[in-house]
Image: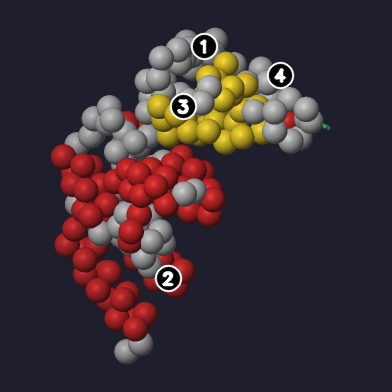
Amino acid sequence: MTDLDQFRSETRAWLAENCPPEMREPLRSEKDVCWGGRNYVPSSPAQKDWLDRMAARGWTVPDWPKAYGGGGLSPAETKILREEMAAINARNPLNSFGISMLGPALLKYGTEEQKLDHLTKIAKGQIRWCQGYSEPNAGSDLASLATSAEDKGDHYLINGQKVWTSYADQADWIFCLVRTDKSSKQGGISFVLFDMASPGVSTKPILLISGNS
Ligand SMILES: Cc1cc2nc3c(=O)[nH]c(=O)nc-3n(C[C@H](O)[C@H](O)[C@H](O)COP(=O)(O)OP(=O)(O)OC[C@H]3O[C@@H](n4cnc5c(N)ncnc54)[C@H](O)[C@@H]3O)c2cc1C
């Protein structure tokens, strides 16, 4: 038996024991999707158990380093885990823009302090993120963005408006593109992370004709 065969059989056994039967059922509604975050209310005890068990093993982000809350798995092991989860119809334990969008950028460009702080909270589902790129006058042409960030020494003062920010009303933190230099259109765009509970941050829904947003 190769190491990967061994890993597959151990993974299969662990999933059989730890993935609650309810977490192998198809999603019935958006409420069944686990996004985590400060205000996370589990849709059922099984959903919380599944998140906690997978997070404890680092398997919400299996290929991230263990130091940042990941599973430290190789690409081949990660593929096996995904296959074994699919084989029992296991739900994704944690949906997260932090995992799919912010995490990879932080892994590559973040400081050690940023990685230790933000990545571990993403992996455990403790902080929910939203993406603040689009603006009323900057969509496909993102370099038109006008939201500014002014360096005030010990903090940045951010002024502007974002739009289409999915789940902004439910997110704890935002990864946001802002202009720190106005001398060129494509240059001077910075990537800042801030708490949505910071003073001055507000969200409002774009209401559809159906009444949803
Ligand atoms: C479901 C959904 C969720 C989203 N969530 C987020 C989010 O969380 N955060 C975020 O920042 N953004 C989000 N967006 C925004 C999205 O990623 C795009 O940036 C945005 O929809 C495009 O901008 P716009 O709507 O202003 O369209 P525009 O950029 O104004 O484009 C309008 C039309 O013109 C076309 N067009 C534009 N430029 C050219 C060109 N040069 N040549 C030819 N045709 C062109 C486009 O293809 C399009 O058909 C979301 C969008 C959707 C639909």
Q: CA distance from mark 2 to mark 4?
A: 42 Å
Q: Residue at x 65, y 27 (%)?
A: 179
Label 1 close to label 2 by CB (< 8 Å):
no
Pick out the residue farthest to the right.
184
Closer to the chain start, of discs 1 and 2, is 2
Label 2 close to label 4 by CB (< 8 Å):
no
Task: Choose top left, top right, bottom left or bottom right for residue 28.
Answer: top left
Label 1 close to label 3 by CB (< 8 Å):
no
Q: Secondary structure at mark 3?
A: loop
What number is the disc on residue 207? 1
Q: Quadrant of the N terminus?
A: bottom left
Closer to the chain start, of discs 1 and 3, is 3
Disc number lying in front (3 or 4): 3
What number is the disc on residue 74? 2
Three-letter code for the amino acid on which mark 4 is drawn? Asn
Label 3 close to label 2 by CB (< 8 Å):
no
Disc 3 C-beta below 8 A from ligand 1 = no
Q: Local crowd at mark 3 within 10 Å, few (<14), some, or many (≥20)? A: few
Q: CA distance from mark 1 to mark 3?
A: 37 Å
Q: Local crowd at mark 2 within 10 Å, few (<14), some, or many (≥20)? A: few
Q: Secondary structure at mark 4?
A: loop
What number is the disc on residue 137? 4
Disc number lying in front (4 or 1): 4
Q: CA distance from mark 3 to mark 2?
A: 40 Å
Q: Secondary structure at mark 1?
A: loop
Disc number lying in front (1 or 2): 2
